[in-house]
Image (cartoon, rainbow, N blue to C red):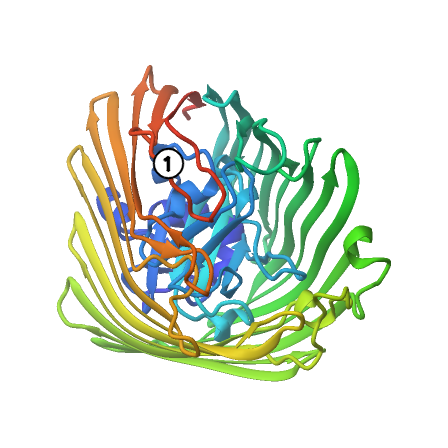
Amino acid sequence: MKRSILSAAIVAAVSPAVADEAPGTSPDSATLEPVQVTATRLSQTVDEALASVTVIDREEIERLQPRQFTDLVEGRAGVSVSSAGPFGKQSSVRLRGTESDHHLMLIDGVRMGSATTGGASWQFLPPEEIDRVEIVRGPRTSIYGSDAIGGVTQVFSRAGREGPPRVNAFLGAGSFSTWEAGIGVAGGTGRTDYSLSVSMFDTEGIDVQDDVGDDDPDGYDNTSLAGKVAHRLDNGIELFGNVLYSEGESEFDSTEGDDYTDFVHAAIRAGFRMPVTSRWDTEISVSHSRDENDRYIDGNFSSQYDTRRDSVDWLNEIALTDRLLLTAGLDAREDRIDVDDPDFLGGEEYEETSRYNVAAYALIQADLGNHLLEGSLRHDDNEHFGDETTGQVAWGLQATDALRLRASYGTAFKAPTFNDLYHPDVGFFRGNPDLVPEESETFELGARYSASLAYVDVAVFETRVDDLITGFPMPENVDEARIRGLELEGGHDLGPWNSRVSLTLLDAEDRDTGNELARRAPVSARFDLDRQFGDFSVGGTILARSRSYDRGDNETRLSGYGTMNLRAAYALDPEWTVEGSLTNVFDRDYETQAGYNNPGRAAFVKLRYQQQR
């Protein structure tokens, strides 16, 4: 059974070299068979995982030249994005037709998200600080707890590796008075790996709403700091720490005045790992995350919705035999909110402003030659809603050297948010302390074919979600949803050519009304194609999405659309590269959320420096 010593969060924190090139693989196969750590908390290649997994590495990130994080994931298999405009505006990233708050975000092993709304702040992730992204589609609650009904996306910041310090820097500018800049250093000794970088992004943006507020562009700025360090002692103990911190301002339309949100988005983690025996490794870590939003209307303070989360994790990897691997752990976290909304709440306060969750989980994997079995079980004890137990089983068959078949069944749940439970009674809305968690079960069949230079992955699934939370003036557990889908993903790296293709077919239905779930397109696709000509490269991305509905009543229709983005890069020498992109080439008008504009045709250029060893 091919496994590294420890788990997902461990590798995420300090070992980017593992993801860059797995031991014993060629550069081509490393590109197409990347190592991922999110599906099971164990380091394994995507081909070995009994789940639908997409990995976006640093090489692909630089090739795609994204302006915002959602540019990287939009249109990928099983992924749909809707937003209230571009550049730092509220964004929802859905997996497999589930809600955005059914999609768990991790940053270097740190759990992120707002405890009041339940959703994660995808719009504040800085692409330049990201080393890779792992998207695991399908339930992962039996490993990570609440919020992973649709799946998990983990973002890894950059890290150092053994070698002398290397400086990297970039400077870019483009349409909408956009500019960006950053500088970093990374390296390592025989004992210590380190990295530190800072980046800035600033844009005047576009007017996101035509008939609301003023006609001025709604800008966005983000300043981010990222750092990682790992130090190995003589006794085998390894100490590690990482931080990704972003703060800035995002404007929006509300009045004719100055309307904006000040935000802080941060993930901090530290801990140690050590071998207990030759077959048992353990890790203990503590983490802290922040999702803070202070809203200003016409330049005056309007509201504050801040979430702070503290967590402690104990993770163990035990090789019971050469073919039987056990991963088990405990985790505990406390969520705290600080809410001040004088106009909306009328002086009222939330009934509760903190709650804890304690959990134990175990994952066992059995390698039976051509067959691989996995089973996981997790028990959560939550201060508010009590106990919740979830589980998952998966089976894989290595049918040929290149073809693996898989099947899985899993249960998951989503805990009610602080707004759902404790929101003060403001007349037209109030919390309901009697709510129970939303629960789901998912069936999946999949197959992955991997040759030396190409791969194809296909999956069909059905998810049923019960006790969906909805309703005004008081939320209730009333709705049921059934989501069926087919996902196709493939790619190849053949000589100078590189391609990736994704297709998603989705049938997402509210079982009570028969309506389609809001903002779920029945068909979506993405195609990336790039070609290298020596020091020069060109490429493009085509995105297509069919019509959908903005609300659950299916009365407001969002038209389907297709866009094309073009890009090019030229290596001036081994250290300097100039990049350029033209987005929305045909200047399409489209909306992913009713009433909110997206950018028209736009051009950007960037000069990048990477010091060579």
Visible residue check, residue 196: yes
Which residue is depicted at the point 32% across and 65% down? 49
The 10 Å Cα crowd at callout 1, few under 14, some 14 to 19, many 20 or more, is: some
Which residue is depicted at the point 63% across and 69% down? 472
Report the quarter where the C terminus lies. Answer: top left
Residue indicated by mark 1? 589
Report the quarter where the N terminus lies. Answer: bottom left
Quadrant location of residue 489?
A: bottom left
Residue that sits furthest to the right in the current view: 347
Vertical arrangement, residue 545 with respect to residue 572, above or below: below
Quadrant location of residue 591?
A: top left
Which residue is depicted at the point 53% across and 31% down? 207
x, y percentage for residue 498?
A: 21, 39
Left or right of residue 245, residue 102 in this image: left
Visible residue check, residue 366: no
**Circle 1: element type:** loop
Quadrant location of residue 351?
A: bottom right
Which residue is nearer to you in this view: 20 or 468? 468
Left or right of residue 441, residue 461 in this image: left
